[in-house]
Image (spheres, rainbow, N blue to C red):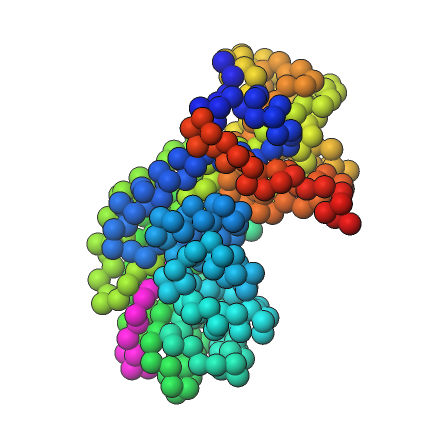
């Protein structure tokens, strides 16, 4: 049995559009958004644009009433083009440029600053209606060390004492509305963590608020909701998480979250053609520049033979790309069926932080992206060409 995406054969898609090819199932995206809205009915949900910034995907997400979580001026501009409500959206920049700060002020987006020094810079260009600061609570969690963004040794946020001074300076500058933000890691598969985070940020907010004499209009606990990649991992009970988090949130303000991976990761598949069989190496036409997560983090992605999902596993193989780096692996010693040159492999759970981190390194041009809606399919980004690079 061939792999289907939506109601379309993956083999037919590969033949029509070529490989490597990113394919997204629109209905999976919509289902995940609906799950979040039902699980967090009283929460302002902002999609993390960095997870996948294809404009057609952004338009789809914006059409569902979500806000946008933007990291810089470019992402703010993409969010505006996609039709996001900027009043429901938030900008969190790390080491932002002056241009980023000016764009944030012009857009009307909620501004969340990573350091007290950035407040002094942004006030040179204008006074935000509402300001937030990012807290580093001294701990973090994530699937890989590289994506833990809270705790000792990370470059993100401020400790409570420095944040308290930042809020005091903002109040003295005449700012009257405030938010507070805490994002500590990505790909978290521990359900109770999000409730712990909610309780932690409220305690910090109450201490700062009492000390400075301010109230918070919103509290943002960031994203980080994990999805299963490896065979032993299971789907998080998103309804349980949402119920627990909203119950724990007792502050008189708005709760915000910033999911990215949960919305888009499982909707994406990377199709790649087998070019070379060499001993126990299966060579494909996608490389680490097409999908860098395995090389960068040692991340696991499910990989199946799209030509025949029923084929028995008969070998342990290394699945590698054409890049001139020995880190160019998608899998090592992976149980695989018999694979032949010309077959199509499907690398799954490839919707988040995959195309978004792609590059044309080593001349492996960025692939096309295609959207699926049941029997319909269309290109949402053309395949990169040499002329594009020139």
* Relative to 217, residue 339 above or below: above
Residue 95 in the figure: left or right of residue 247: right
Residue displayed at 76% across by 45% down: 387
Residue 141: where, in percent of width, then height?
A: 44, 51
Residue 298 visible in the shown view: no
**Residue drawn at x 53%, y 47% as measured from the top left:** 54
| Residue 129 in view | yes
Position of 390 relative to 135 (above/below): above
Question: Residue placed at 22% from the left, 67% from the top?
Answer: 252
Give how far across and how far down residue 21 sits, in percent.
60, 33
Q: Residue at x 67, y 23 (%)?
A: 274
What is the magenta range?
Answer: 210-221
Q: Position of residue 119 (x, y in %)?
A: 49, 78
Total numbered circles:
0
Q: Is residue 24 above or below residue 110?
A: above
Q: Quadrant of the rendered structure where residue 121 is? A: bottom right
Please give left or right for residue 13 compared with residue 184 in the image: right
Q: Nearer the viewer, residue 240 or 257?
A: 257
Q: Please say if 243 is above or below 149.
A: above
Q: Is residue 211 magenta?
A: yes
Residue 191: x and y, percent? 33, 45
User: Residue 283 lies in what quarter of the image?
Assistant: top right
């Amino acid at each position: 049995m061939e792999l289907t995406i939506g109601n379309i054969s993956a083999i037919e898609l590969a033949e029509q559009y070529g490989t490597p090819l990113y394919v997204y199932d629109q209905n999976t995206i919509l289902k995940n958004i609906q799950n979040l809205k039902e699980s967090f009915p009283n929460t302002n949900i902002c999609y993390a644009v960095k997870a996948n910034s294809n404009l057609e995907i952004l338009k789809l997400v914006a059409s569902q009433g979500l806000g946008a979580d933007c990291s810089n001026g470019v992402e703010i501009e993409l969010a505006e083009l996609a039709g996001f409500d900027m009043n429901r959206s938030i900008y969190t920049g790390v080491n932002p440029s002056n241009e980023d700060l000016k764009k944030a002020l012009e857009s009307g987006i909620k501004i969340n600053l990573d350091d007290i020094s950035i407040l002094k810079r942004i006030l040179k260009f204008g006074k935000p209606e509402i300001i937030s600061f990012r807290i580093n609570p001294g701990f973090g969690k994530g699937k890989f060390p590289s994506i833990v963004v809270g705790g000792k040794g990370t470059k993100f946020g401020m400790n409570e004492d420095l944040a308290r001074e930042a809020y005091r300076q903002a109040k003295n500058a005449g700012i009257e509305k405030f938010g507070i933000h805490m994002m500590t890691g990505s790909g978290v598969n521990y359900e109770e963590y999000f409730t712990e985070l909610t309780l932690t940020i409220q305690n910090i907010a109450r201490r700062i608020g009492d000390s400075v004499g301010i109230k918070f209009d919103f509290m943002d606990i960031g994203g980080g909701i994990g999805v299963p990649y490896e065979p032993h991992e299971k789907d998080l009970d998103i309804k349980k998480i949402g119920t627990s988090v909203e119950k724990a949130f007792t502050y008189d303000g708005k709760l915000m979250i910033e999911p990215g991976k949960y919305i888009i990761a499982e909707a994406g598949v990377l199709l790649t053609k087998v070019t070379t069989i060499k001993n126990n190496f299966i060579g494909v036409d996608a490389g680490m520049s097409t999908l860098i997560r395995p090389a960068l983090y040692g991340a696991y992605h499910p990989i199946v033979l799209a030509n025949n999902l029923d084929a028995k596993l008969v070998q342990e193989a290394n699945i590698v790309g054409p890049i001139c780096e020995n880190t160019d692996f998608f899998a090592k010693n992976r149980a695989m069926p018999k694979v032949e040159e010309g077959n199509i492999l499907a690398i799954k759970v490839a919707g988040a932080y995959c195309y978004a981190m792609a590059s044309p390194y080593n001349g492996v041009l960025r692939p096309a992206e295609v959207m699926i809606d049941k029997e319909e399919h269309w290109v949402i980004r053309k395949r990169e060409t040499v002329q594009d690079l020139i």
